[in-house]
Image (cartoon, rainbow, N blue to C red):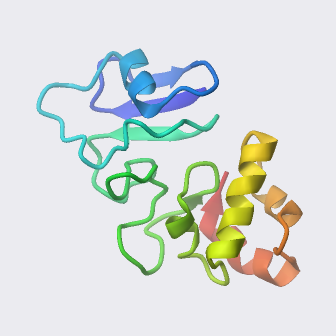
Amino acid sequence: MVDVTGKVGDPGVHRLPTGSRVEDALRAAGGVRPGTDTGALNRARVLVDGEQIVVGGPPGAPGAGGTAGSPGAGVPSGTGPAAGPVSLNSATSEQLETLPGVGPVLAQHIIDYRTQQGGFTSVDQLREVNGIGDRRFADIQPLVQP
């Protein structure tokens, strides 16, 4: 299930088969309204249950796509702090690396965990990811969302 919002014909929560892509979600939501810029969306990206796709939102808006080719997770393109909570279910490795203490290896552990578990339903599940102890969890917890 994904929440498609913004400039689409039928915004809302849509149930799609496992393995569906952003393009499928846009189609299920009645298509993108004419004149809407979708350059920030990676239409080929595989969806994760529970994520939100914002169509026509400003780059860096939660679910808006951040940069071309990324799933969008409230992180602007480039480096620096997140503009909003980072989505554990849709952030790229690069977006996860904007979190304190998260480098390429830990970012991959987070991605591997969400793939194996079918996504995060709670931020507390980060404690189950290899490499995240109490201190790192305390630093990351206020900056992320499932």
Left or right: residue 66 versus residue 19 is: left
Q: Is residue 113 above or below residue 5?
A: below
Residue 20 is at least partly visible in this image: yes
- Give whichever of 50, 79 is nearer the camera: 79
How many numbered marks are there? 0
Residue 120 is at least partly visible in this image: no
Q: Residue at x 37, y 48 (%)?
A: 64
User: In the rendered image, which quarter is residue 105 located in?
Assistant: bottom right
Q: Residue 131: horizontal and vertical position, in percent? A: 82, 75
Q: Is residue 98 above or below residue 11?
A: below
Q: Residue at x 44, y 25 (%)?
A: 25
- Give whichever of 103, 99 is nearer the camera: 103
Q: Is residue 85 above or below residue 89?
A: below
Q: Residue at x 77, y 54 (%)?
A: 113
User: In the rendered image, which quarter is residue 145 located in?
Assistant: bottom right
Q: Residue at x 18, y 35 (%)?
A: 36
Left or right: residue 35 versus residue 73 is: left
Q: Residue 31: horizontal and vertical position, in percent? A: 30, 20
